[in-house]
């Protein structure tokens, strides 16, 4: 009967080895001898059974285990078997044709009459599953890296629980200055609302409510207080609401706009400093002027008395072009009724003479608790010439707008180990050429693709990323196919291997060329007088102060102040347009007479200043003043050349008459008035013994 049992057991195992998926093999525990092996095991390894038996099954099986896994397999099986009585592990087998097979092995100890105590091993092919898991992990890592490369952060917030943070990218935490672990503790306690400045919370809650109610994407700007105590501006873009039971979840992208806000304030300050008309107005059914300076009345062509009488009667909208009146009224009313900053406004006016001029107004609010109505302070200046130029380049601007709207940011991939770069097709669309994948950073730094002045920025960035820096931002210029260089901002995030060694970097190239050029243009515009094109008072004062501070012992400079004799009388008799033409003509002559090292400015009204850099003596300064005085006598009042103007000049010399701009200006001004007292049409060197 015992023999029949053994025979039945043998038949059972033979059948089992044929129907079980994967390979089976049994080892005697006493000496690790191979007791049996299924045909499917040899098929798994691509080996013939006879060949394996000839080599010895134990040696054959040991040989097909990947060399890097053999020791681990032996140790893990022994450890798990003798402790738990069973074992499970994942390792590689070498197929006969050389490729690797991932197998998952399940082992257990069996005590049988036929074989005694032995270890039964079942090997299942796990290659496809293992590869799929590796692809999933790689995709997850690349997705996470791309999210962290976005300039800002991504987060899921619970609108039902005080904006509790459900998930956030590294970039989101980097914006706050807190780590993810720190955000879980007090004072944040996992609530994004704890970052927000309390005054900004109502607007943020209102925006979230609108998104939840209407399911329309919203954009909200607000301030946060970072870990170091500083304030930063954030802009949130939320486009989707999810519902999980009773909980409402907001998905959003959060951008740090602090730098943009700071730049915006600087640009507004520059625009508001441009000379022109200054007015104070209020809305009383219409736009009424409370106060205006002389520059404002020069712009519209009315005297203050004329402006207060019919047909204008102090109503500013009556001088605004009929086609623009309603638009201006609505913009002013909206500005008064809200707490928002008013952007600059372009519109047309009709002057007293009937000519149409383009104006640009910049406004700020005046809050006075003693006044029943709120007032607005405005700076207005003439941009007619700018508008004429704008029409000439309208077609070019339209082409630029279309290109800008259709162009997407360039996402590039740098393999640090092979130093190869991949740029998508959008790079070729934007710059007009492709960069071969095999070309790496060394090629970029040695070619003319990067602007020569910016290559050290790129070289420093490459070195920092190779050195393990996880994230960086830099700006540099990239050549287009036509040779033009465009400013781009690069945001780059590194990918590390298990040893925290940088192996790849993913970056985003953003076109910031238009922003760079516009900022430079506005800065240049703010330094000039809008009528004459000379430097304005604020600019020449700063430049003179800088020049005096850099002067060395023994150097002398001269400041010459001048104005037109009886200009008010000429302006009143000939009209403001003729007066402006006279100022423009004289300014052109002064600019032409001045050397490149000198500085010429319109200080206001009919007063001009010239800073002569590097005079030999006071006599040299007076010679320069004499040449400028001759310019007045060459400037004609009318085109017929019947009468010329004269001027009065005052001269102060550095360092004898002062070591600061204020001192030189005060003394040159005093000398100018001595010239007027002497009968005008002359120049005077400052002398402390003279009195005005």
Image (tube, rainbow, N blue to C red):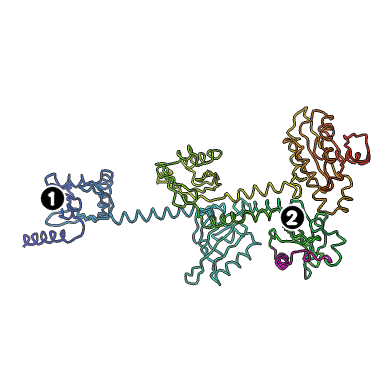
Looking at the image, which is closer to me, 156 or 440?
Answer: 440
Residue 166, position as x, y percentages in the image: 50, 62
Q: Report the residue marked by disc 2.
A: 382
Does the magenta portion include 335?
yes
Q: Find the distance from the CA under tag 1 to the CA under tag 2.
A: 97 Å
Task: Tell me if residue 689 comes above or below residue 160 in the rendering.
Answer: above
Looking at the image, which is closer to me, 51 or 598?
Answer: 598
Q: Nearer the viewer, mark 1 or mark 2?
A: 2
Q: Which residues are magenta?
A: 312-339
Residue 30, position as x, y percentages in the image: 17, 48
Residue pictured at 79% horizontal, 33% vertical: 557
Residue 515 appears left or right of 279: left
Residue 385, position as x, y percentages in the image: 71, 53
Sequence order check: which comes first, mark 1 or mark 2?
Answer: 1
Looking at the image, which is closer to me, 231 or 56?
Answer: 231
Q: Quadrant of the N terminus?
A: bottom left
Q: Quadrant of residue 543?
A: top right
Residue 602 appears left or right of 443: right
Q: Is mark 1 in CB contact (under 8 Å) with mark 2?
A: no
What crowding class fits label 2: few (fewer than 14 Cα within 10 Å), some (14-19), or many (20 or more)?
many
Does the magenta portion include 292?
no
Helix, strand or loop for disc 1:
helix
Q: Report the residue marked by disc 1.
A: 49
Q: In this view of the protein, can residue 244 be seen by the observer?
A: yes
Q: In this view of the protein, can residue 361 be seen by the observer?
A: no
* Most common SS among magenta residues: helix
Residue 47, position as x, y percentages in the image: 16, 49
């Amino acid at each position: 009967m015992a023999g029949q049992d053994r025979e039945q057991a043998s038949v059972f195992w033979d059948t089992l080895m044929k129907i079980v998926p994967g390979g089976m093999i049994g080892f005697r525990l006493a000496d690790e001898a191979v007791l049996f092996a299924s045909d499917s095991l040899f098929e798994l390894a691509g080996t013939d059974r006879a060949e394996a038996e000839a080599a010895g099954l134990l040696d054959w099986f040991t040989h097909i285990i990947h060399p890097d896994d053999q020791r681990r397999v032996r140790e893990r099986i022994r450890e798990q078997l003798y402790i738990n009585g069973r074992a499970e592990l994942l390792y590689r087998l070498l197929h006969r044709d050389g490729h690797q097979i991932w197998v998952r092995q399940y082992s257990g100890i069996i005590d049988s009459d036929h074989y005694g105590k032995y270890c039964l091993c079942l090997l299942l092919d796990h290659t496809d599953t293992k590869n799929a898991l590796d692809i999933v992990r790689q995709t997850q890592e690349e997705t996470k890296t791309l999210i962290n490369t976005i300039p800002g952060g991504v987060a899921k917030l619970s609108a039902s629980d005080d904006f509790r943070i459900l998930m956030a990218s590294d970039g989101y935490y980097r914006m706050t200055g807190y780590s993810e672990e720190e955000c879980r503790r007090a004072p944040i306690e996992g609530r994004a609302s704890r970052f927000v400045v309390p005054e900004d919370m109502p607007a943020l809650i209102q925006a979230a409510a609108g998104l939840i109610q209407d399911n329309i994407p919203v954009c909200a700007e607000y301030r946060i207080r970072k870990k170091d105590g500083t304030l930063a501006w954030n802009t949130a873009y939320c486009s989707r609401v999810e519902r999980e039971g009773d909980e409402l979840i907001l998905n959003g992208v959060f951008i740090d706009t602090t730098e943009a806000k700071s730049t915006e304030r600087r640009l507004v300050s520059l625009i508001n400093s441009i000379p022109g008309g200054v007015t104070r107005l209020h809305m009383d059914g219409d736009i009424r002027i409370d106060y205006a300076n002389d520059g404002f009345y020069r712009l519209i062509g009315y005297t203050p008395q004329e402006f207060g009488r019919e047909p204008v009667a102090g109503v500013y909208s009556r001088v605004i072009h009929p086609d623009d009146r309603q638009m201006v009224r609505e913009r002013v009313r909206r500005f008064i009724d809200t707490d928002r900053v008013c952007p600059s406004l372009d519109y047309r006016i009709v002057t007293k003479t009937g000519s149409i001029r383009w104006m640009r107004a910049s406004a700020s609010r005046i809050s006075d608790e003693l006044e029943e109505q709120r007032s607005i302070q405005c700076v207005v200046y003439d941009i007619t010439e700018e508008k004429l130029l704008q029409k000439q380049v309208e077609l070019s601007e339209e082409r630029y707008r279309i290109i800008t709207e259709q162009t997407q940011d360039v996402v590039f991939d740098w393999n640090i180990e092979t130093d190869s770069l991949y740029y998508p097709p959008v790079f070729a669309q934007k710059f007009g050429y492709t960069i071969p994948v095999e070309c790496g950073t060394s090629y970029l730094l040695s070619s003319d693709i990067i602007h020569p002045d910016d290559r050290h920025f790129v070289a420093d960035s490459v070195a920092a990323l190779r050195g393990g820096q996880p994230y960086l931002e830099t700006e540099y210029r990239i050549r287009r196919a036509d040779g033009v260089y465009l400013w781009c901002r690069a945001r780059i995030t590194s990918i590390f291997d298990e040893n925290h060694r940088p192996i790849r970097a993913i970056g985003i190239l953003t076109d910031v060329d238009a922003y760079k050029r516009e900022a430079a243009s506005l800065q240049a515009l703010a330094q000039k007088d809008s009528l004459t094109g000379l430097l304005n008072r604020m600019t020449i004062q700063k430049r003179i102060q800088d020049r005096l501070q850099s002067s060395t012992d023994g150097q002398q400079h001269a400041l010459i102040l001048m104005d037109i004799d009886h200009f008010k009388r000429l302006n009143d008799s000939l009209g403001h347009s003729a007066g402006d033409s006279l100022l423009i003509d004289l300014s052109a002559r002064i600019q032409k007479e001045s050397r490149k090292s000198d500085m010429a400015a319109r200080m206001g009204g009919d007063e001009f200043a010239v800073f002569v850099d590097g005079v030999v003596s006071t006599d040299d300064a007076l010679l320069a003043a004499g040449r400028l005085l001759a310019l007045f006598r060459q400037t004609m009042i009318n085109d017929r050349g019947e009468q010329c103007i004269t001027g009065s000049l005052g001269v102060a010399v550095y360092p004898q008459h002062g070591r600061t701009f204020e001192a030189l200006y005060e003394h040159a001004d005093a000398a100018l008035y001595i010239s007027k007292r002497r009968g005008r049409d002359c120049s005077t060197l400052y002398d402390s013994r003279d009195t005005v």
